[in-house]
């Protein structure tokens, strides 16, 4: 997982919930990342932290997840890691949703990875917020419906 900000916490919890064998958090400042994610550190045995230089020299794993804003509009020509790092991964997820395909995802796709952007997460957060505001459960199909409509609008 690239990054250690607020979005990283939600992603990290999802990874833990899915019982990942090993989780590596990549950060510019490893000590600060450990402090920011302290609650996860104390209850997760398979969590490690590395800096980008170390990570870029050991590129292999199942899924790489970018939780940083790198590559988000308007700075779309940037990627969180060099293209060659993608070669050792099966899949890449970028929580960025604008643009739909970031440079990070384009690099991953070129390396043969399965890819996923952040549009679904954005819509799921919006639906969850509406449920709080309306104080009621919305239909389970709403996320997929809105995500599909939004994707069609953005692409067309």
Image (cartoon, rainbow, N blue to C red):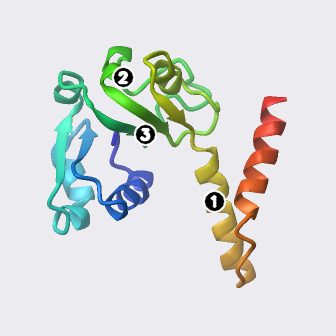
Q: Which residue is mark 2?
A: 86
Residue plotted at (42% across, 38% down): 66
Q: Nearer the viewer, mark 2 or mark 1?
A: 2
In the shown orientation, is residue 72 left or right of residue 123? left
The reply to whether discs 2 and 3 touch (Cβ–Cβ < 8 Å) is no
CA gap, disc 2 and disc 3: 16 Å
Vertical placement of residue 30 versus 73, above or below: below
CA gap, disc 3 and disc 1: 19 Å
Query: Which mark sits nearer the N-terminus, 3 or 1?
Result: 3
Q: Which residue is mark 1?
A: 124
Query: Which mark sits nearer the N-terminus, 2 or 1?
Result: 2
* Label 1 SS: helix
Expressed as whole percent of the image width and height from the top left, the position of residue 54 reads 16, 28
Expressed as whole percent of the image width and height from the top left, the position of residue 20 reads 28, 54
* Label 3 SS: loop
Q: Which residue is mark 3?
A: 68
Residue plotted at (30% across, 60% down): 19
Q: In terms of depth relative to the viewer, which is nearer, 74 or 84?
A: 84
Quadrant location, the C terminus: top right
* Label 2 SS: helix
Expressed as whole percent of the image width and height from the top left, the position of residue 136 reads 72, 83
């Amino acid at each position: 997982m690239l990054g250690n900000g607020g979005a990283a916490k939600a992603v990290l919890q999802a990874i833990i919930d899915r019982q990942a064998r090993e989780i590596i958090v990549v950060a510019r400042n490893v000590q600060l990342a450990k402090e920011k994610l302290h609650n996860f550190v104390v209850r997760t045995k398979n969590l490690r932290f590395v800096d980008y230089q170390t990570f870029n020299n050991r590129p292999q794993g199942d899924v790489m997840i970018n939780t940083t804003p790198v590559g988000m509009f308007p700075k779309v020509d940037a990627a969180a890691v060099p293209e060659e790092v993608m070669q050792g991964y099966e899949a890449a997820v970028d929580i960025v949703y604008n643009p739909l395909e970031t440079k990070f995802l384009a690099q991953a796709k070129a390396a043969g990875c399965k890819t996923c952007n952040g549009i679904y997460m954005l819509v799921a957060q919006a639906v969850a917020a509406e449920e709080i505001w309306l104080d009621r459960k919305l239909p389970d199909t709403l996320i997929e419906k809105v995500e599909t409509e939004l994707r069609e609008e953005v692409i067309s």
